[in-house]
Structures are given as C-alpha cells and as structure tokens.
Image (spheres, rainbow, N blue to C red):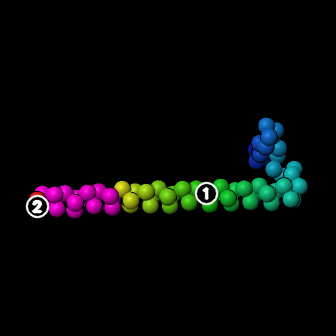
C-alpha cells in the first residue's frame, strides 16, 4: 500500500510517521488551501460578472451617443 507523503523544505516525509501536532498542521494547510481555491473561484465569478456589467454599460452609453 502506497503511503501518503509530504514534501517540506525539500525533504520527504511519510504522513503517518509525523507527530500528531504535525498531522494537525497538515490538515490546517489543506483546509486553508481549499479555502484559497474557493476564494479564487469566487473572484473569477465576480470578475466575469464585472466584465458583463461593463459591457452592459457600454451598450447603454452607445444608445445615448447614437441619439446625438
């Protein structure tokens, strides 16, 4: 059975051989990494929406310019 490995500061460790404190820190890092990914996904959604709103403004402004 392949054991999970962790590479830290250029050294490889088997996770099951780590202390309980180190295992908890690995879990903390995994949680934070997942949260960062979630925030990045939310940022991408917000950025896409912003682009759409900007296009809508451009469309509305062009209607005013066409009336002049």
The residue positioned 44% from the left and 61% from the top of the image is 46
Give 19 or 64, whichever is nearer the viewer. 64
Say whether residue 15 is left or right of residue 49.
right
Give 14 or 34, whichever is nearer the viewer. 34
Say if the magenta span includes residue 66. yes
Give the residue pinned by disc 2. 67
- Of the numbered discs in the image, which one, if any, rests on residue 36? 1
- Of the numbered discs in the image, which one, if any, rests on residue 47? none
**In this orientation, does residue 1 appear?**
no
Q: Earlier in the sequence, mark 1 or mark 2?
A: 1
* Number of numbered labels in the structure image: 2
Viewport quadrant of the C terminus = bottom left
Secondary structure under the numbered disc 1 in the rendered image: helix
- The magenta segment is 52-67
**Label 2 neighbourhood size at 10 Å, few (<14), some (14-19), many (20+)?**
few
**In this orientation, does residue 38 appear?**
yes
Say if the magenta span includes residue 40. no
Q: Position of residue 18 (x, y in %)?
A: 86, 52
Q: Position of residue 55 (x, y in %)?
A: 29, 56
Say whether residue 51 is left or right of residue 38.
left
The answer to whether the residues at label 1 and label 2 have Cβ atoms under 8 Å apart is: no
Please identify the quarter of the rendering in which residue 34 is found.
bottom right
- Which residue is the extreme one toward the top? 10
């Amino acid at each position: 059975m392949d054991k999970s490995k962790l590479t830290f500061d250029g050294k490889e460790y088997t996770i099951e051989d780590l202390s309980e404190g180190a295992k908890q820190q690995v879990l903390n890092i995994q949680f934070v990494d997942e949260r960062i990914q979630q925030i990045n996904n939310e940022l991408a959604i917000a950025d896409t929406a912003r682009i759409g709103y900007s296009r809508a403004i451009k469309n509305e402004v062009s209607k005013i310019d066409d009336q002049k």
